[in-house]
Amino acid sequence: MRKALLALALLLVLVPVAQADSIMPGFGSVPTGWVTDRYQPASFSNVGVYEGRTDVLGIGISSNDRLAGRAAAFQSTFYNTQGMQYALTGGAGAFLTADLFIPELWADGAYGAVRTDIWGVLSDATDARSGYPIIGFTNYGGDARYRYWDYMGDGGWTNVSTPVGYDAWTNFGILFTGSSVVYSINGT
């Protein structure tokens, strides 16, 4: 079973707005309040202390849940993205942030493809979905890299030139300015 580990960021993040309010929930009470998004991961729990952090979220993906192993209703690549979501409310200045520990082993896709992201969901004044800001790490289909989803432009992935830090925590952030989003990696 592969695990992607996230922890709530406890960092001072400088952002280009007067006030930024972190709306990311803590992981101390996981899974309370979290619901399945697309497909239930094999495990989703607070693993306690990991790599010097407390209240660390552990997400496990099992090979038993691959496309061929899922029930007929989930026989689509759409459900290859497995995770949980938490309903949040925020406006201009709202900031999602989480830390991801990236082990050295993830540098080489030959040891298994990895993709792990932090997602936001934007809604317009009528409560219709208007965007999905996403930032994260992958080694799928090429070199290991950070990337973000360009939901406002062409709607594709944009690779980031920031070198991946291995055997270390990486902070990902999504700031909603009121009219766009600003992505950050380790505060920049």
Image (cartoon, rainbow, N blue to C red):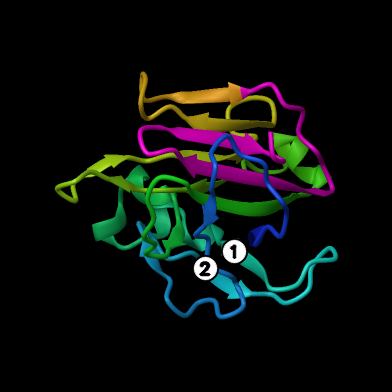
Determine if residue 115 is in view: no
The relative height of residue 44 versus residue 102 in the rendered view (above or below) is below
Asked whether residue 131 is drawn in magenta, I would say: no
x and y, in percent, of residue 91 in the image: 37, 50
Specify the quadrant that holds the N terminus: bottom right
Residue drawn at the location 51% of the way across and 33% of the way down? 182
Pointer 2 local density, CA inside 10 Å: few below 14, some 14–19, many at least 20: some
User: Is 96 left or right of 144, judged from the image as shown?
Assistant: left
- Horizontal and vertical percent position of residue 108: 75, 35
Residue at 68% across, 46% down? 13
Q: Nearer the viewer, residue 27 or 82?
A: 27
Residue range in magenta is 160-188
Which residue in the structure is indicated by mark 1? 60
User: Does the magenta-highlighted stretch encompass residue 179?
Assistant: yes
In depth, the one of 126 and 144 nearer the eye is: 126
> Element under label 1?
strand
Residue sitting at the far left = 126
Q: Amino acid at mark 2?
A: Ala
Task: Tell me the SS state at disc 2.
Answer: loop
Where does the C terminus fall, quadrant-wise?
top right
Instruction: Bin the neighbour count of mark 1 within 10 Å (Cα to Cα): few under 14, some 14-19, many 20 and up.
Output: some
Residue hosting label 2: 42
